[in-house]
Amino acid sequence: MHPHLRRHDLPFCWPDPPFRVVLVRPEIPPNTGNIVRLCAATGCPLHLVGPLGFRLADKSLKRAGLDYWDEAELHTHPDWDAFRQTVPDDRLHLFSTGGTRCYTDVRYQPGDLLLFGSESVGLPDPLLRAYPDRVLGVPMRPGKVRSLNLSNTVAIVVYEALRQANKI
């Protein structure tokens, strides 16, 4: 950051409504804790769709989220069907290592749902098949690395959506 700029001096427009981050079946508490912190910093509501691979009281989850839990808007849903009953919006983007379109190739709009799957298997296949034209990926070099860390991927996508929202 430039030495003469404070964080609140940066020219930035927060989208209204905010982008919404959705984790489907997350498994690793520190990743989710880091995403809680990201959502607190960006104003993105976070939806956790179960079954979860941890308890919300998990110490490593709380530690990764630091003292930002009260700043994050957190929603939990027991499963996909319960989530869709609560949040039926169709403006959604799915992120997968199998995505054939780059995450920068779409136009994000305030209020969009940004869906990410579990660390071990990603989004469920039926979900990917239901929305094949909305599956996006973050480019990686060919080789032995199968995927990026979930919290890193969420951060990359959220900040691209915010960047686009600020080009009004």
Image: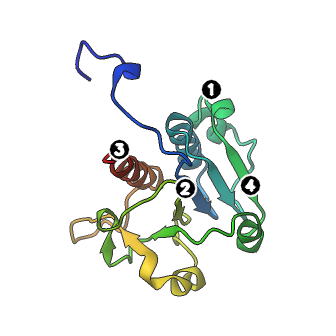
Amino acid tagged 3: Asn
Q: Where residue 81 appears, x then y in whole percent?
A: 75, 74
Residue located beneath label 1 in the image:
67
Q: Residue furthest front?
A: 168
Q: Position of residue 40 (x, y in %)?
A: 56, 36
Q: Which residue is mark 4?
A: 76
In terms of secondary structure, where does tag 1 sit? loop
- Between the C-alphas of marks 4 and 1, the distance is 19 Å
**Circle on res. 166:** 3
Q: Is residue 100 rendered to the left or right of residue 67?
A: left
- CA separation, marks 2 and 4? 18 Å
Q: What is the three-letter code of the residue carrying label 2?
A: Gly
Q: Residue at x 70, y 71 (%)?
A: 80
The residue pinned by badge 2 equals 111
Q: Nearer the viewer, residue 107 or 103?
A: 107
Q: Residues within 10 Å of mark 2 (few under 14, many from 20)?
A: some
Closer to the eye: label 4 or 1: 4
Look at discs 2 and 4 and give the one toward the viewer.
2
- Residue type beneath disc 1: Asp
Distance from disc 1 to disc 3, alpha carbons, whole Å, reads 28 Å
